[in-house]
Structures are given as structure tokens and as C-alpha cells.
Image (spheres, coloured by chain):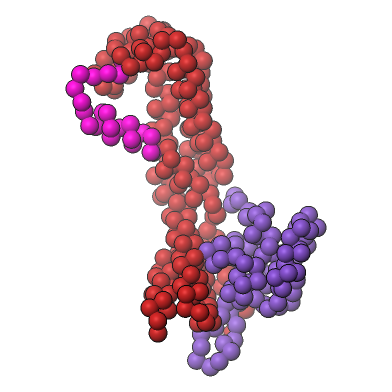
Amino acid sequence: MPRHPFNSQQTRLLLFTLLQHPENWFHGYVLSRVTGLKSGTLYPLLMRLNDHGLLAARWSEPAQPGRPPRHEYRLTPAGLALAREQARSSPELIPQLATEGAAP
Amino acid sequence: MTLQRRTANELASCLRKILPDYRAAWGVGIENELLHIQHDGEALRWVFGALVSACLERATALASAPVSRAFLCFPILFQALGAAFAPSLLLAWRGNHLQAAALLGSQTPGDDFHRFIPLLAILPAWYVTLGLFACLLFLASAVQLLRRSPSALALFLAALALELLSEAAVRLLPGYLEISHQVFSFPNQNFRRDVLIPAATSLLPLLVAATLGLAQRSQPPATPPSLSSAEPL
């Protein structure tokens, strides 16, 4: 059985960011800018969350014709439930998101 | 196009090749993200970070493969034999099973267990217990590794800790260090005996522990999850 990477501060920060706008899809670079997580940290987290059905991933329509599509992400209902549960247990992280401004 | 941007693009294409097949969509996603990073230096840092995680994903996939797991059992079994060796020799000598002692002694430098008698005479019973228990823990680790259980690493580390504790404790015995120095001194220098084997036996458990850690980092999914959860364009 795999170890669930849900308890690290980075994971919780990512979950809270996605929780701020649950209906929006986020691109990887935007998530990196908002959370402050580097790509080497962010993408393994995104992959693990996706592996466990907590994160949905899709290809977005390119903004300009001829450009390749972008991968974008948002929480699944299970992911939202986990994020809310962790928000209750880690309220100290929420002000950090408020100052960084979690906007898509 | 600046050198930084060209390098970032090249690294991104390497990243796609490094990632395991079931992460292919992620590799494409990371590469496509580069086009939306305006600053070339930032793009290079972005792809470099992702490249490190791609290498880790590949290493995890390799370590998690059934062949890798089966192969990893061999060094673990080697560790188990090592942990049981001295206690077995001690039990054989004290139980007057001289044939068994001679057989074990033939596996040592000098091919004779009689050299170890001064050392065997002062080793306590708890040394046997700890050594055999460490051996059992190593064997349990190998079994759990084959069963893909996350406890394999914990068992391996526990066995290692027990071995180290046993060796540290036995050094505190009166006279142990002097007798040990006499027993393990040889008139001629031998690179294999004096350098290679000690280095290998010191490094091997670290490599095994690191590989076990990678193997249990995350199980690769049976089907590519990104594509199954992604909505079509």
C-alpha cells in the first residue's frame, strides 16, 4: 500500500490553494506562483493527488491557435473533502494564502 | 532564442523521455507550460526542478518493478547471513559442533575458526540473541518486500539498527578491542580483504535502504490516471 503524501505542509498549502476556488482549473505554473512551490515539489504532489483520485487533470483549449494545450488541475469532490478537513486542522496556513492571493 | 531558453527546451524534451510511460501526459504538460513562462531564466529553473522529479519518478518505477524487488532480496539475504554468521559460529563452538564451526570458519580470512576462539570466549549470550534477531528481521524485510508491503523498509532499518547496537555494545566488553585487533590483524596487506570488502559491506546496507525507500515512495498506478481522469478537448 503506498504512503499517502497528504500530511506535508507543501501538500496542505497546495490543497488550500485549490480549495479557495474549487470550481476553477489551475495551470501548473500558476499554482507554482501562488503557492511558492517549485516545479520539482509541485509536480510530484500533483501526480500523487491525481493517483489517489483527489485531483482531476485535463487538457485545456489553447488560448491562441497553433499553441499546444496546457495541463490544468482542480480538486475532485474527494479532494475537496480532504482539503476542508485539513483546513480545519491547519488554520495557520490559511493567512499565508490570503497574503499570496490565490487567483487563477 | 537565448541560451537559457534553448537549454530549457532541450531539458524539457529529455524530461519527457525520462518519465515513465504512465507519466507521459504529465511530461507533455510540463513541457507545454514552458511556453507560458516569459522569463527565460525562470523557464530554465522551472524545467530543471521538474527534471529532478522526473528522475525520481523513473527511479521509483524501476525500484518498484517486480524484477527489482526480487533482485533486491539478494543483498537483504546477504545482510541476514552476515548478521547470523558470528552468532552461528559462537553457537557452533560453544555447542562443541566443531564440524559446523570449521565450515563457518572456512568462510573467513585464514579459513580457520580457531583464530577466533579468544574472541568467541568473551562474547556474551545476548550477542547471539541480538544477531539472530537481526537476521530474522532482515528475512522478514525480504518477505515483506516481495509482498510489496511498506513495512519492508522499517524492518530493514530495525535490523540494521540492531546490528549496529550489538556491535557498539560488544565493543564495551573488557578486552574485546585488544583481542579483536589481534584476531583481525594479518601480516600481509590485501586490498580486497582490507579495503574492498569493508567498503562494500558498509555501503551495501545504505544502498539497499535507499532503494527500499524509493520502492515504497509510491506505487505506480495500474493505468495512466491522468488520461483516465482528464476530459477530452
Residue A74 falls left or right of residue A40:
right
**To which quarter of the image does residue B192 belong?**
top left
> In the rendered structure, does residue B187 fall within the stretch colored magenta?
yes
> In the rendered structure, does residue B164 fall within the stretch colored magenta?
no
> Which corner quadrant holds the N terminus of chain B?
bottom left
Question: What residue range appears in magenta?
Answer: B183-204
In percent of width and height, residue A33 lies at 61, 72
In this structure image, what is the colour of chain B?
Answer: red
**Colour purple maps to chain:** A
In percent of width and height, residue B203 lies at 38, 38
Residue B130 falls left or right of residue A20:
left
From the viewer's side, name the closer residue of B220 and B45. B45
User: Residue lying furthest left in this view?
Assistant: B188
Name which residue lies at 79% across and 58% down.
A91
User: Residue lying furthest right in this view?
Assistant: A88
In percent of width and height, residue B124 lies at 48, 11
Name which residue lies at 59% across and 73% down.
A28
Count of marks placed on residues: 0
From the viewer's side, name the closer residue of B140 and B207. B207
> Which corner quadrant holds the C terminus of chain B?
bottom right
Whether residue A22 appears in this view of the structure is no
